[in-house]
Image: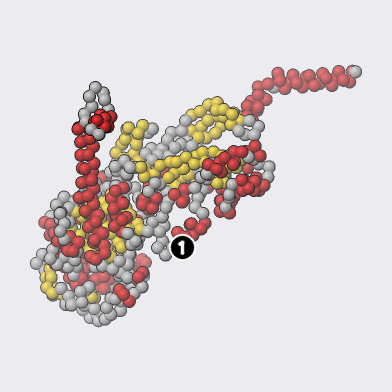
Amino acid sequence: MLFIILLAAVLVSRVYYLQVVDYDHYTTLSDKNRMQLQSVAPTRGLIYDRNGILLADNQPVFSVSIVKERVDDLEQTIAKIGNIIELSDDQIKNFDRRLKNRRKPYDPVPLKSKLTESEIARLAVQRHLLPGVEVEAELVRNYPYGELMAHMLGYVGRINIKELKNVDATNYSATNYIGKLGIEKFYENVLHGKVGRQTVETNARGRVLRVLDQVPPLPGRDITLSIDLRLQQVVAEAMGDYRGAVVAIEPATGDILALVSTPSFDPNLFVTGIDHKSYAALRDSLDIPLFNRALKGQYPPGSTIKPIIGLAGLDTAVVSRQTKIQDPGWYQLKNDERFYRDWKRYGHGVVDLYDSIVQSCDTFFYSMAFKLGVDRMSLYLDKFGIGSRTAIDINEDRKGILPSRAWKRGTKGLPWFPGDSLNMGIGQGFMLATPLQLATATAVLANRGRWHRPHLAQKISEGISQDESVEIPRMHETDPPDVILNNPEDWDYILGSMKSVMHGKKGTARATGRNSAYKMAGKTGTAQVVGIKQGELYDAEALAERHRDHALFVGFAPYEAPEIALAIIVENGGGGSSTAAPVARKIFDAWILDLPKAEQEKETSSRIKYETFPSHNNVDPVSVSVERRHNHG
């Protein structure tokens, strides 16, 4: 009896110690065991075109995830899930990779996204048999226009450990996605938002019972782009099945109106993780749809740079407006057996600088390039952005190659030869430029030397209020210096020759400019893909399709007050006048004639609708319209 009493006293004293003396300590431990601090992901900002059309939004999808710490046998749990819903080998492999890259314990790791209603229902029925398995809704990026905007918008994808090291880990503690390319990547800090937090009470199975405290997340800010979706659609349709790129810029502002690279891909495939088969098809395609030709494609610019070389010749007095040559169809350096051929076999006869731009006479430019030399040609091409990365909010574009003596010595280990200058004078040889650079240079030409750095974003919403917005700094203070000529009238001379390319009797693109309701200026170009031996003639039919010349075009319109400047590259398209220029005409017509007309008709229709049936006594004009139509049968 004494022994039992002693044990009871020990038990009572221990209970007293736990529940009275050390009450606060164990209460805190108990609360920590049933209460958790969770991060709450912010809603990603939306992306619109210049007319307010939604280009990137967020859609709710259901995903099944696994919390490893709450699962006794992980492989068995995955097998059970596989018996309930279909799981592919790629999904299981991706899950294993995400599990290894998990940021902290008790983080749910996604196994499969975009569950169907049937899959959600089957998992819900079996939920009591799957401890540690969660089915939750999340907002996932969606690109409603798919391939049309892929190379410009880029896409988001699941964040990895390497990317997490370069961002604020706390702010991304609840975020599964991050911008990978394009606008999504460049403006990641703007679009992402700020993480929130909440304290939740859970049961023994880890299920959330209630939210005890919450600090809501701040959503990402919306971005309005300079891109016009309607023009983007026109460009894509005009390019058709061609491989190539088009960049269109508004000269007065630097707004990029369209940026198209064809062929393209569907960015929605990459958001929640692309399967191996689909990725292999894109990666191994000969047309390389994943390659952004508009920003990364580097091509010989061909004759499209002749207006700039012509300005260099005039401004340095190497040639004058009275300078003329006899073009026999070739040019030859002194003591050199090689013939530098003109595209026209028997030449253009007697030509001056104006004629040589209109007819794209290579022989005149061989002669002028020899006199100019590489140093002066590089200097003037650099003034127009060739060989430079000039865009404000694009960081994936390449610099191209603007050759110089130092460049050749450093990369080739050779001196600069006179023949190199001749090739450079017609946009061949070592020189490479991107479509973005050519469009930028054309916009500077259209502005008569005035610089506006190209950019994609127009506005960023201010905070969580979408009614307040702020203009993105145009960074004019960082614009390259304007191109100033010794004789400003040289602008009229060179740009006039570009107008004659489109409307002159001998212009290389006169067929494209025929019967136009407005005047345009342009320059066609053709860039060799494979070399041709001396004495041989170019025969496109004898070459494989991918070995044929590239077709190029640069231009702006209307001539008197330019609203749009563009650059077009059609890979293996042959002649610039026959392939690229007609594409430009469709784009010019759409921007100058069709789109404004469609907008005006839309406004007129809307105005008539409300003016014909005005609202009286707070009656909705639409209701009045319906009533009157009914009364008249």
Q: Position of residue 23 (x, y in %)?
A: 68, 21
Residue placed furthest toward the left? 322
Q: Position of residue 389 (x, y in %)?
A: 32, 54
The part of the image, by quadrant, that contains residue 382 is bottom left
* Coordinates of residue 282 in the picture (x, y in percent): 45, 59
- Determine if residue 128 is in view: yes
Report crowding for label 1: few under 14, some 14 to 19, many 20 or more residues within 10 A (C-alpha): few
Q: Could you tell me residue 430's position as x and y percent?
A: 31, 67
Reply above or below: 77 against 331: above
Using the rendered view, name the quadrant where residue 517 is placed: bottom left
- Say whether residue 80 is left or right of residue 386: right
Q: Residue at x 48, y 37 (%)?
A: 41
Q: What residue is rendered at 9% in x and 67% in y?
A: 322
Look at the image and tell me in which quarter the N terminus lies. top right
- Horizontally, residue 588 falls left or right of residue 102, namely left
Disc tally is 1
Residue that appears at 56% across and 41% down: 120
Q: Residue at x 29, y 57 (%)?
A: 238
* Left or right of 29, for residue 321: left
Figure check: 587 above or below 362: above
Nearer the observer, 449 or 519: 519
For the residue pair 583 and 340, the one nearer the viewer reads as: 583
Q: In this rendered view, identify the residue nearer to me: 575 or 469.
A: 575
Q: Quadrant of the C terminus?
A: top left
Q: Which residue is mark 1?
A: 284
As drawn, which residue projects farthest toward the right?
1
Describe the element under mark 1 as helix, strand or loop. Answer: helix
Q: Is 427 placed above or below 534 here?
A: above
Residue type highlighted by circle 1 = Asp
